[in-house]
């Protein structure tokens, strides 16, 4: 066999070996990713949206939910559930958007859990969506319905927000639930709803049910 043919054969063998090793490595990486995604300790880093003076609004005015914004609590895209969306505006104008009032309340318990640089004292104002009009309302002005049969973005129990108490009462007549103000929402209730939501979301994801 000529030296040229030997060299060609060696190059071909090296390429085949490299491709084989790459395939094994890629397969292991895919398996590793799958294992991480199957745990309850998924770390989703959702950056805040910085304030832009060109928006033409006041620093602490509610703003439109960006299509690519992610909820820092659950990782969902609030733009896909605008009827439930919430937002927190920090004193420097940065904003975090939430898929639902439940996620917003969970975040308000300990912002530093999701970003060590954020604290409750840094928050200027929080808003939720009035389910009857789609308008933003300050969290302290909202009336919340808890325990209704309305399902949030994760197809589990959540808080339905209203600006008008009478409209909230009419909602309860057909959908059930009780009236609550923000200051009446206890950590234990948040924990219960959060656990239920995680369970329902896991079932939905595994079964791909509508």
Image (cartoon, rainbow, N blue to C red):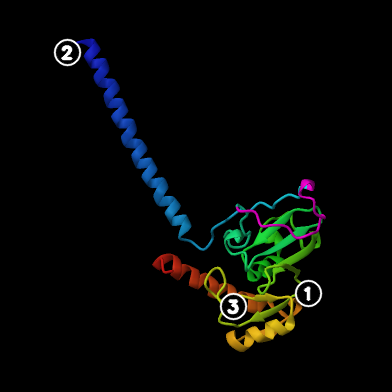
Among all residues in the image, which is located at the extreme bottom?
Answer: 173
**Could you tell me which residue is drawn at 30 percent across and 21 percent down?**
11
Among all residues in the image, which is located at the extreme front?
Answer: 133
**In this rendering, is residue 87 above or below 177?**
above
Viewer-nearest of discs 3 and 2 = 3
Mark closest to the chain's N terminus, 3 or 2: 2
Viewer-nearest of discs 1 and 3 = 1
Q: Quadrant of the N terminus?
A: top left
Judging by the rendered image, the residue that carries numbered circle 1 is 141
Q: Which residues are magenta?
A: 53-67
The image quarter in which residue 203 lies: bottom left
Q: Quadrant of the C terminus?
A: bottom left
**In this rendering, is residue 123 above or below 21?**
below
Viewer-nearest of discs 1 and 2 = 1
**Front one among 117 and 70:** 70
Residue 184: x and y in percent read 73, 81
Helix, strand or loop under label 2: loop
Q: Count neighbours of disc 2 (C-alpha within 10 A) and say few if under 14, some if 14 to 19, many if 20 or more.
A: few
Q: Are marks 3 and 2 in contact (CB under 8 Å)?
A: no
Mark closest to the chain's N terminus, 1 or 2: 2
**Front one among 195 and 124:** 124
Judging by the rendered image, the residue that carries numbered circle 3 is 192
Residue 57: x and y in percent read 80, 54
Judging by the rendered image, the residue that carries numbered circle 2 is 1
**Could you tell me which residue is drawn at 68 percent across and 75 percent down?**
161
Main secondary structure of the magenta stretch: loop
Residue 207: which disc? none
**Could you tell me which residue is drawn at 58 percent across and 58 percent down?**
77
């Amino acid at each position: 066999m000529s030296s040229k043919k030997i060299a060609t054969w060696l190059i071909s063998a090296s390429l085949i070996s490299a491709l084989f090793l790459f395939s094994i490595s890629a397969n292991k990486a895919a398996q590793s990713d799958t294992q991480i995604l199957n745990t309850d300790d998924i770390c989703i880093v959702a950056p805040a949206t910085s304030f832009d003076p060109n928006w033409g609004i006041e620093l602490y005015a509610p703003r439109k939910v960006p299509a690519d914004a992610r909820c820092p609590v659950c990782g969902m895209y609030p733009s896909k559930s605008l009827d439930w969306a919430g937002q927190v505006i920090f004193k420097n104008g940065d904003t975090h958007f939430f898929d639902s009032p439940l996620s917003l309340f969970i975040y308000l318990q300990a912002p530093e859990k999701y970003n060590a640089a954020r604290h409750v004292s840094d928050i200027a104002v929080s808003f939720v969506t009035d389910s009857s009009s789609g308008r933003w309302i300050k969290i302290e002005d909202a009336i919340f319905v808890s325990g209704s049969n309305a399902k949030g973005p994760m197809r589990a129990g959540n808080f339905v927000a209203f600006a008008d108490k009478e409209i909230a009462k009419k909602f309860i007549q057909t959908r059930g639930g009780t009236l609550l103000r923000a200051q009446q929402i206890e950590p234990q209730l948040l924990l219960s709803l959060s656990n239920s939501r995680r369970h329902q979301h896991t079932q939905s994801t595994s079964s791909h049910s509508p």
